[in-house]
Image (cartoon, helix red, strand yellow):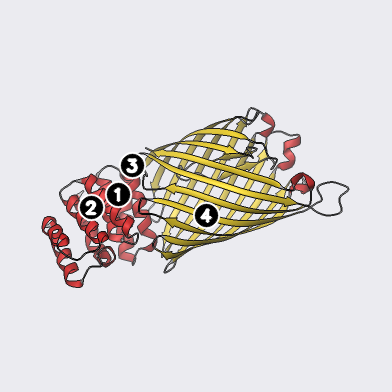
Amino acid sequence: MPEFRQSILAALLVLVSIACPAPAQTGADLNALLSGGRPAEALELARTSDLSPADLAYVEGRAALADNRLPDAIAAFRRALRLNPEARLARWYLAQALARDGQVEAALFQIDELLPEARGADERRTLLSARSRLVAQRPWGLTFGMNLQPSSNLNRATLNTEAPIFGGLVGTIDTTAEEGFSATLQAGAFRRFDLGAGALTLSGSLAATRATVDGLDRWQLGAAAAWIRPLDRGRLTLRADGLTTFYDDEIRDFTLVGLSVDREFFGERTLYRLGARVARQWYDDPGRASIYDNTSVTLTGDLRRIITPRLALRAGLAVNRTNARDPRFSYDAIRPSIGMERSWPSGWTVLGNVYYEQEWFDAPFFAFDTEKRIDRTVGLGLIVGNNSVVIRGFTPRLSCNFARTGSNVVFYDNIDVEECNLSLTRRF
């Protein structure tokens, strides 16, 4: 798509200094050669100049892209981004190379990385126009995922998936530990609609889980709709989602629906996010399980502070109010957390965090108790993943959680939870 490339080049030339912070004269000569359609000469100049490895990889990518050697161009631009994650022009040309290679999903991912920090209205319009053209090429998609979960708490019914718009939908009957192993296969489909001021995505999913604990085998159906609107140095996301489950042990069957809004702000080196979510969960069984029917409201605030291009500080605070049918399971909660994120040139990222959660329940657990129930949890979370493979191949992600809960109710005191989830997801 040569006309697609040329239409945006002028608007993004201001980013060259970020992609190629070479000496001024060398940078000007390189820009002139690349813009003038002389990539071979630019590559020769780059190899004889005192350029950084990131700058050299960028020029090699431009030369390969001009010769239509798309795999070489993609590899070179990815190498430039691994060496300098802030090389915005390299990211833009990577998006072009991916689009020309038919990897529309991966190209959209790169443009979405550029949009929140677009410099000025002209650049934002150009990027939005490029995104609209890509969405028009492939407005639909399929996902396939596998999940393996060894855990000491399989009683928590969770659908873990990397599919777009899905993820994090959790339904819980109680926190009684049941050790075991579960495996989940998930398939989904989504459809995008470009609305000019934003994008709407509708998606659906079907998952089957088999567990070693009797009664926990289940099917899950999910659906979601999300509207994302880029704003000045930020993004607004509205999302509605829901899932329903069908267990072998029918008393556990439940349905969950939720509505959430998130506002992201991009500062100089800090990402701020404010969110709110309202969720309703109910169980199909009219007897014992119905006491867990609940409505919850959660407010969250998070920040990600870049310390170096490869290291970031993460911190967050969440407050929650849950009203259950049985007041013994209604509570107020607060959860602060802090952690560090580290990435490597290979594309691997590790996020570790510690958190503390306290829940104040509305009523004593036993009728003869004089004190209301209070639970306190201290936990350690670890997430390891690699997002370099976003379309042609599986994206790996390992998440582990280690926590201990103490309570003034003996049934919930000194409960240890150790669980790990390994997910492999492929998008088609």
- Which tag, 1 or 3, sits closer to the chain's start? 1
Q: Tell whether label 1 touches label 2 (CB within 8 Å).
A: yes
Q: CA distance from mark 4 to mark 1?
A: 38 Å
Farthest residue, direction right? 368
Return the residue at label 2: 4
Which residue appears at 62% of the width and 34% of the height?
Answer: 180
What residue would you read off at disc 3? 138
**Element carrying mark 2:** helix
Residue 136 lies in quadrant: top left
Residue 216 in view in this figure: yes
Are discs 2 and 3 less than 8 Å apart at CB?
no
Q: Residue 273: give x, y in percent of width and height.
A: 51, 61
Q: Which mark is residue 133?
A: 1
Q: What percent of the width, then of the height, locates residue 414?
A: 72, 48
Quadrant where the C terminus is found in the figure: top left
Distance Cα–Cα, label 3 vs label 4 = 36 Å
Task: Mark 2 or mark 1: name the one nearer the start of the chain.
Answer: 2
Q: Which residue is mark 4?
A: 352
Dot in front, 3 or 4:
4
Marks 4 and 2: which is nearer the front? 4
Q: Disc 2 marks which amino acid?
A: Phe
Position of 105 compared to 24: left or right?
A: right
Q: What residue appears at the point 30 percent right and 43 percent down from the top-left corner?
A: 103
Is residue 345 placed above or below 281 in the rendered structure? below
- The mark nearer the N terminus, 3 or 4, is 3
